[in-house]
């Protein structure tokens, strides 16, 4: 069944990727669009397909996979279904790092300064959260610490943007809080992809340890799982993925929370199976949201986070309702 | 008053009496203002009124201009502006300057304007100039407010002559696109549109049915293949909004197909400075 689910998710990602390439305000007929993408003879069509739509679709997959996988990993490690990169302030802190790099001019000095700054922000947030509410802290501590870190990161991001001499900086706050993939380019793909892939490899390697952790920390330790190693790898993996995703797309909420929730029953609640499934599921959700953004209000640059929250929040409420009905 | 006539006649006379009292008060105010002569301490809190005031004011009449006028990216009269003290458009500091006239823009914070008026300061808000034809009106209005009608008349005739000289008939009308941060553009009913037309260019945004300001998706812009791309000037500090100006698709379009120009401070305000913008564009027209 897990194999069928995997194939289904891969199929959905591929289909949505194709739709994402075919949707856009330029109004290209599908055949013409694909010819332009592959052959590249007409200047306008080729620019639209290769420089605007292709990087956008690729980023949707990368960012979605990053958020879904990071969410599943956080939930697996903390054994708490409320953990999510956005909820515990990792995305917000990554955004703060990225904004600082941009505003101090560091991002212009070296191309890697932006993702590294975002990564540093994410690492700091994860370390802070783990210190405040490690696995022994209750879920209340985790959420309270997360809210505090998110609020602080959000406030500092707004402060930095408010102080900027750039007239557009204040409106950027929306982008860093809500996220968007509009008009990203191949540069952004090249910037984010290595960090996201590296982070994914690290987190996927932790699957077995998460499986063992479901039995409790002591049992996992007796099975040869090094808790320190897991913790360090988790921090690095999550920070790398979420940091890179946030640096190019802003903070997109709810994906990391909702996707593992939806998929958990389908993979038999096994963390090691949930990790790759959540990566694919995250890609599906972000691709869908990014297509919806362009279809619903094509001229208004609707923010991605608005859509993921609009889709995610009701789903989440439904899940809570179902859990309650089961008397859990 | 129409309502009053529909009701009782007694009410009508009451309304009439009240109306005459209002008119009387207004007349007295007007007479008082006229007797007081031109304002002696004028404060401008808007970039565009700054420029008109600096062009028209008599010596010592203009006390302070807005902070933005000292910004080299936005100000067309930087050298002159640097000789004036600046304000930050906040009611408290403006009030302390003890002005007898404050010039503000249509979109100046309504709270500031209301508060200043409440404090008894005479605040005049000038409408945004959206067409070349409205520029003489703006000049004359500020001239009247400052009591500098002669200066204003001279400036208007100078502007009209300059514009007539630049507005020559041309055989071709290349298509231009205005591309600002966040893919913002302006179509018909905007100053930039008039500047384009006066220089002999058609505005792509107007073709797309955009009136005033609007957003033109990057994809649409590329598909329209403009002959000239006029980009918004980059501001200091970084912003994601401006990244679209150097997006690879735009760079490729400029490298392989379209000519390029920058829209700078000359484009911002409806003042005679727009003539410089038109002259620069006209050169591109002849060059291409």
Image: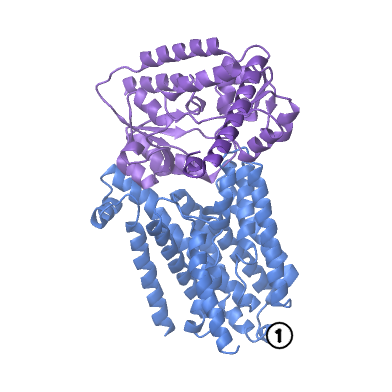
**Picture coordinates of residue A11, whole percent (x, y):** 36, 72
> The C terminus of chain B lies in which quarter of the figure?
top left
* Residue found 28% across the figure and 53% down from its top: A33
Which residue position is annotated with label 1? A218
Crowdedness near tag 1: few (<14), some (14–19) or many (≥20) residues, C-alpha within 10 Å: few
Left or right: residue A322 compared with residue B170 = right
A301 versus B84 height, above or below: below
Q: Quadrant of residue A109?
A: top right
Depth check, front residue: A208 or A286: A286
- A180 up-or-down from B217: above or below: below
Tally the marks.
1
What's the colour of chain B in the image? purple
Q: The disc numbered 1 marks a residue on which chain?
A: A
Residue A37 place in picture, x, y as percent: 30, 52
Q: Give the drawing colour for chain A.
A: blue
* Image height of B270 relative to A165, above or below: above
Q: Nearer the viewer, residue B9 or B219?
A: B9
């Amino acid at each position: 069944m897990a194999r069928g689910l995997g194939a289904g998710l891969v199929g959905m990602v591929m289909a949505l990727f194709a739709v994402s390439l075919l949707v856009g305000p330029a109004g290209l007929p599908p055949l013409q669009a694909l010819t332009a993408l592959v052959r590249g003879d007409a200047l306008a069509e080729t620019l639209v397909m290769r420089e605007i739509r292709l990087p956008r679709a690729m980023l949707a997959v990368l960012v979605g996979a990053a958020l879904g996988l990071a969410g599943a990993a956080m939930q697996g490690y903390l054994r708490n279904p409320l953990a999510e990169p956005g909820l515990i302030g990792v995305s917000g802190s990554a955004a703060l790092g990225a904004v600082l790099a941009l505003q101090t001019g560091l991002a212009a000095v070296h191309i890697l300064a932006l993702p590294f700054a975002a990564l540093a922000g994410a690492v700091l947030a994860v370390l802070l959260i783990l210190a405040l509410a490690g696995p022994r802290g209750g879920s209340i501590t985790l959420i309270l610490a997360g809210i505090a870190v998110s609020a602080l990161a959000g406030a500092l991001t707004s402060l930095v943007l408010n102080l900027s001499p750039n007239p557009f900086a204040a409106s950027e706050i929306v982008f860093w809080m809500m996220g968007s993939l509009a008009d990203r380019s191949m540069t952004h793909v090249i910037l984010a992809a290595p960090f996201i892939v590296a982070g994914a490899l690290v987190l996927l390697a932790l699957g077995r340890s998460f499986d063992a952790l479901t039995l409790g920390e002591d049992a996992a330790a007796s099975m040869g799982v090094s808790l320190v190693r897991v913790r360090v790898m988790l921090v690095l993996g999550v920070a790398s993925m979420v940091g890179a995703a946030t640096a190019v797309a802003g903070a997109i909420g709810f994906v990391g929370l909702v996707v593992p929730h939806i998929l958990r029953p389908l993979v038999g609640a096994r963390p090691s199976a949930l990790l790759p499934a959540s990566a694919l599921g995250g890609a599906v959700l972000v691709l869908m949201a990014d297509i919806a953004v362009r279809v619903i209000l094509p001229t208004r640059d609707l923010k991605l986070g608005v859509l993921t929250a609009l889709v995610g929040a009701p789903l989440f409420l439904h899940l809570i309702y179902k859990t309650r009905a089961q008397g859990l | 008053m129409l309502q009053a006539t529909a009701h009782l006649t007694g009410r009508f006379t009451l309304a009439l009496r009240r109306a005459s009292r209002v008119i009387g008060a207004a007349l007295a105010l007007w007479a008082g203002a006229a007797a007081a002569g031109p304002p002696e301490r004028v404060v401008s809190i808007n970039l565009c009124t700054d420029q008109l005031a600096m062009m028209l004011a008599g010596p010592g009449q203009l006390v302070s201009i807005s902070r933005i006028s000292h910004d080299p990216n936005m100000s067309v009269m930087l050298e002159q502006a640097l000789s004036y003290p600046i304000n930050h458009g906040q009611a408290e500091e403006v009030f302390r300057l003890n002005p007898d006239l404050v010039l503000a823009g249509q979109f100046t914070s309504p709270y500031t304007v209301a508060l200043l008026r409440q404090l008894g300061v005479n605040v005049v808000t000038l409408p945004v100039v959206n067409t070349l034809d409205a520029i003489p009106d703006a000049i004359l209005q500020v001239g009247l407010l400052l009591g500098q009608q002669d200066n204003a008349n001279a400036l208007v005739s100078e502007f009209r002559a300059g514009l007539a000289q630049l507005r020559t008939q041309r055989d071709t009308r290349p298509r231009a696109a205005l591309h600002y941060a966040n893919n913002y553009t302006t179509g018909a009913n905007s100053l930039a549109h008039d500047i384009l037309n006066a220089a002999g260019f058609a505005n792509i945004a107007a073709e797309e049915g955009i009136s005033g300001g609007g957003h033109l998706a990057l994809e649409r812009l590329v598909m329209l293949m403009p002959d000239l791309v006029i980009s918004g000037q980059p501001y200091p500090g970084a912003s994601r909004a401006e990244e679209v100006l150097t997006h690879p698709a735009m760079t490729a379009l400029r490298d392989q197909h379209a000519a390029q120009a920058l829209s700078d401070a000359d484009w911002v305000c409806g003042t005679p400075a727009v003539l410089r913008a038109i002259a620069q564009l006209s050169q591109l027209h002849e060059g291409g």
